[in-house]
């Protein structure tokens, strides 16, 4: 086989003068801390792009770069290596000439992979370089890629004993590796790993009359995944409850719990809820990716004028800012992004949440605990004795909490919170309906952000098309304008969508709007005046994102509920 240099990636990049010694040392320190591959860290830190790394390795080691997307691989080559070997080492046979086998590799410096391939095929092996994205697409194309859940179910059928782990997990983080032997443990681990891989926000495990159903919410849509037999349901639920710190003996009352998982350098918190049904307990696990707390306001999806409006409002040292929308609309993420923007050593920022979804350095965060007497109301009263500059209340649920929050805003604090209403204008009216005096609402509220989440078009299969004339007229675009849609590909699991972005309406209070609030005018009148003063409705925000090619017209209409 080809003899490769034993140089590491860092040495190669340093020799090629593509990276400075200081940058390399920083990347190596990150690697030691988080355990990521060096190449991934260098890309994440912005020192080099994946393309630049590939080209450097290719030039320095004289290893060719191959485009797998345009490569047709004969079936007989695919049978040369076991599927497990291909997936484990991320290699793919692409060409054979006499006793020489060319293989595509994500990491051509992996000597172990080259040795293993050579041992199996008993031929000389020559590596070529491909990107990780290309390799994943090729594997999806050429192999029936079983999900982790499906693989776990197959192993269950091999006759493993259905042994349930009895002891509680003592570690802060639960590993999601597949090394544990218990089939129930293996299934739960594989379910969590699959959810992480697919970018799921929630996992639903629910009993039916004759079977059980497992679903994952991906990009806002629930999708079924393979489920085990009904006899596995109780052990699986018990396993999840043990991890979450719940009482497995209590099955007829709702319970809440949480735990953390770690896969590589990725840490995700899970908020777990059980609910008794006629067929047994339904369990929902909410995945809280801790990296989401690091979002900046720029990453949320605001249109430029709304982003500028929000940034100007939060510059003020006092006022009441509300994020409003239904459950799962990204309200908490928006508030965390604002807090992240405002966070500094000069500001005392304190939060009271139920629960604490994300942790941010520099913030004092408290979790509601009614059994211990810590409610939103009592927590907020205590916070005011902690000399705060900025306060975040997880949710306004009652008149008492709303009143204290408003008084806090009126006494020189910047207060952020969430409220469940359909739009921005409705939030102001909702506070008055709760029993808060209208003059207090008018004086304190500085901004209301109404929001939803919509799916983005998959970049891998994004395709342009000419819209019909009625649609062009509706959108106000010319005859030559193009719209976009996803045709479906392995990257988006053939949905045409991958990832989500926010659609917003930002209601900035002024004297005229405050006058309407004082007179207890309807939310419709408040909305109408806000539009006159330049507020962009969520519908118009969504349509603009259609014109910009970020989403489809179907998704925009569905999310904003407009016929």
Image (cartoon, helix red, strand yellow):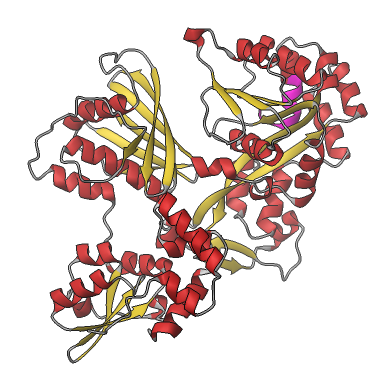
Q: Where's residue 7, x and y in %?
A: 36, 75
The secondary structure that dominates the magenta segment is helix
Residue furthest bottom in the image? 98
Inspect this view and state whether residue 453 appears: yes
In-front residue for pair 502/132: 132
Q: Where's residue 443, x and y in %?
A: 85, 20
Q: Quadrant of the C terminus?
A: top right
At a point 71% along the width and 60% down the height, the residue shown is: 472
The span picked out in magenta is 420-429
At a point 26% along the width and 32% down the height, the residue shown is: 212
Residue 243: name its quadrant.
top left
Q: Is residue 520 left or right of residue 58?
A: right
In-front residue for pair 69/89: 89
Q: Where's residue 310, x and y in %?
A: 77, 40
Residue 254: name its quadrant.
top left
Residue furthest left in the image? 159
At a point 62% along the width and 34% down the height, the residue shown is: 362
Q: Is residue 58 left or right of residue 231?
A: right
Q: Is residue 201 on the magenta stretch?
A: no
Circle count: 0
Q: Residue 236, relative to residue 73: is it above or below?
A: above
Residue 222: name its quadrant.
top left
Q: Is residue 427 on the magenta stretch?
A: yes
At a point 74% along the width and 69% down the height, the residue shown is: 479
Q: Residue 354, relative to residue 460: is it above or below?
A: above
Inspect this view and state whether residue 419 appears: no
Q: Quadrant of the N terminus?
A: bottom left
Q: Where's residue 438, x and y in %?
A: 82, 14
In-front residue for pair 351/531: 351
């Amino acid at each position: 086989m080809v003899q490769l240099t034993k140089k590491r990636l860092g040495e190669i990049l340093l020799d090629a003068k593509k990276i400075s010694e200081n940058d390399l040392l920083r990347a190596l320190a990150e690697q030691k801390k988080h355990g990521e591959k060096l190449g991934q860290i260098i890309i994440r830190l912005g020192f080099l792009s994946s393309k630049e790394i590939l080209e450097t390795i290719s030039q320095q080691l004289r290893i060719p770069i191959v485009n797998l997307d345009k490569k047709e691989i004969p079936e007989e080559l695919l049978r040369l290596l076991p599927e497990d070997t291909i997936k484990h080492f991320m290699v793919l046979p692409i060409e054979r000439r006499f006793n020489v086998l060319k293989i595509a590799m994500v990491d051509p410096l992996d000597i172990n992979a080259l040795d293993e391939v050579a041992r199996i095929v008993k031929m000389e092996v020559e590596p070529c370089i491909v990107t990780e994205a290309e390799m994943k697409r090729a594997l999806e194309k050429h192999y029936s890629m079983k999900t982790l859940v499906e693989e776990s179910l197959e192993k269950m059928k091999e006759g493993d004993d259905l042994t349930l782990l009895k002891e509680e997990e003592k570690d802060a983080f639960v590993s999601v590796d597949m090394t544990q032997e218990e089939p129930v443990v293996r299934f739960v681990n594989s379910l969590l790993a699959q959810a992480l891989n697919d970018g799921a926000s929630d996992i639903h495990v629910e009993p039916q009359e004759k079977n059980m159903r497992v679903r994952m919410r991906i990009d806002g849509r629930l999708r079924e995944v393979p489920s085990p037999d009904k006899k596995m349901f109780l052990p699986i639920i018990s396993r999840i409850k043990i991890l979450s710190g719940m009482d497995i003996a209590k099955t007829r009352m709702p319970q809440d719990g949480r735990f953390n998982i770690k896969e590589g350098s990725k840490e995700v918190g899970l908020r777990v809820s059980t609910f008794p049904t006629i067929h047994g307990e339904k369990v929902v696990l909410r995945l809280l990716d801790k990296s989401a707390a690091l979002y900046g306001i720029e990453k949320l999806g605001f249109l430029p004028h709304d982003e500028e409006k929000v940034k100007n409002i939060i510059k003020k040292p006092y006022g009441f800012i509300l994020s409003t929308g239904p459950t799962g609309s990204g309200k908490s993420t928006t508030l965390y992004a604002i807090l992240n923007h405002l966070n500094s050593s000069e500001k005392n920022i304190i939060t009271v949440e139920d629960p604490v979804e994300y942790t941010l350095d520099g913030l004092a965060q408290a979790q509601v605990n009614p059994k211990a007497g810590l409610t939103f109301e009592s927590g907020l009263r205590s916070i005011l004795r902690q000399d705060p500059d900025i306060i975040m209340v997880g949710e306004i649920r009652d008149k008492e909490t709303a009143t204290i929050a408003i008084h806090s805003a009126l006494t020189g604090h910047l207060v952020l919170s969430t409220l469940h209403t359909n739009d921005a204008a409705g939030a102001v009216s909702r506070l008055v309906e709760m029993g808060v005096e209208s003059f207090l609402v008018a004086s304190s509220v500085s901004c209301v952000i109404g929001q939803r989440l919509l799916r983005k078009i998959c970049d891998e299969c994004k395709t342009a098309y000419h819209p019909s004339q009625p649609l062009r007229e509706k959108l106000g675009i010319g005859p030559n304008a193009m719209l976009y849609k996803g045709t479906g590909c392995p990257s988006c699991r053939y949905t045409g969508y991958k990832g989500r972005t926010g659609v917003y309406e930002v209601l900035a209070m002024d004297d005229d709007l405050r006058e309407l609030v004082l007179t207890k005018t309807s939310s419709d009148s408040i909305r109408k005046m806000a539009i006159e003063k330049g507020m962009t409705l969520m519908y118009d925000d969504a349509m603009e994102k259609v014109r910009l090619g970020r989403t489809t017209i179907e998704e925009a209409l569905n999310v904003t509920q407009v016929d």
